[in-house]
Image (cartoon, rainbow, N blue to C red):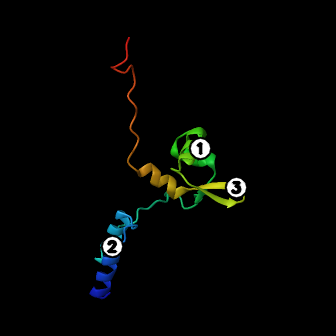
Amino acid sequence: MKESTKTIIELAISNDGQVDCQIAKLIKNALNGSLPEQANTRSSNPDEPLLLPMNKAAKKLGVSRVTFWRLVNMGTIKPVEIFEGVFRYNYSDLVGLSQQRSKYAPKARGIPSNSAA
């Protein structure tokens, strides 16, 4: 790729306020020839399905169906509609979720210090 093409792309990215910072960084790294290695999100069993029903997906994550449903309602897990009203869950999304660092901050428990006893 020509240097002028790289410069144009970098200028376009830096001047477009709607480009996500992580995407911009990924594009700039790609222009410099360094691409991230893709993690193997498949299990060692090639016969495992790509899309899982809710019960199996919840079991893979080690959570109850209710907790899994909460994750879906929060948008943490996105369902794939394979037929009208029939949903499955992407195996690689579940693996990605399990590999993320926890963003959960537990609430403080007990009696607040400013309440009267």
Q: How many marks?
A: 3
Up-down relation of residue 110 to residue 32 (above or below): above
CA gap, disc 2 to disc 1? Answer: 40 Å
Amino acid carrying mark 1 in the image: Trp
Q: Residue at x 70, y 55 (%)?
A: 86
* Mark sitting earlier along the chain (1/3): 1
Amino acid carrying mark 2 in the image: Asn
The location of residue 15, given as percent across then percent down, is 33, 73
Q: Residue at x 60, y 58 (%)?
A: 51
Q: Which residue is mark 2?
A: 15
> Callout 2: few (<14), some (14-19), or many (20+) C-alpha neighbours within 10 Å?
few
Q: Which residue is mark 1?
A: 69
User: Nearer the viewer's eye, disc 3 or disc 2?
Assistant: 2
User: Nearer the viewer's eye, disc 2 or disc 1?
Assistant: 2
Residue farthest toward the top in the current orientation of the protein: 117
Residue 49 falls left or right of residue 26: right
* Mark sitting earlier along the chain (3/2): 2
Judging from the image, what secondary structure is the residue with disc 3 in? Answer: strand
* Mark sitting earlier along the chain (2/1): 2
Q: Quadrant of the N terminus?
A: bottom left
CA gap, disc 3 to disc 2? Answer: 42 Å
Judging from the image, what secondary structure is the residue with disc 2 in? Answer: helix
Q: Quadrant of residue 114?
A: top left
Q: Quadrant of the C terminus?
A: top left
The location of residue 83, given as percent across then percent down, is 71, 60
The location of residue 6, given as percent across then percent down, is 30, 82
> Callout 3: few (<14), some (14-19), or many (20+) C-alpha neighbours within 10 Å?
few
Q: Which residue is mark 3?
A: 86
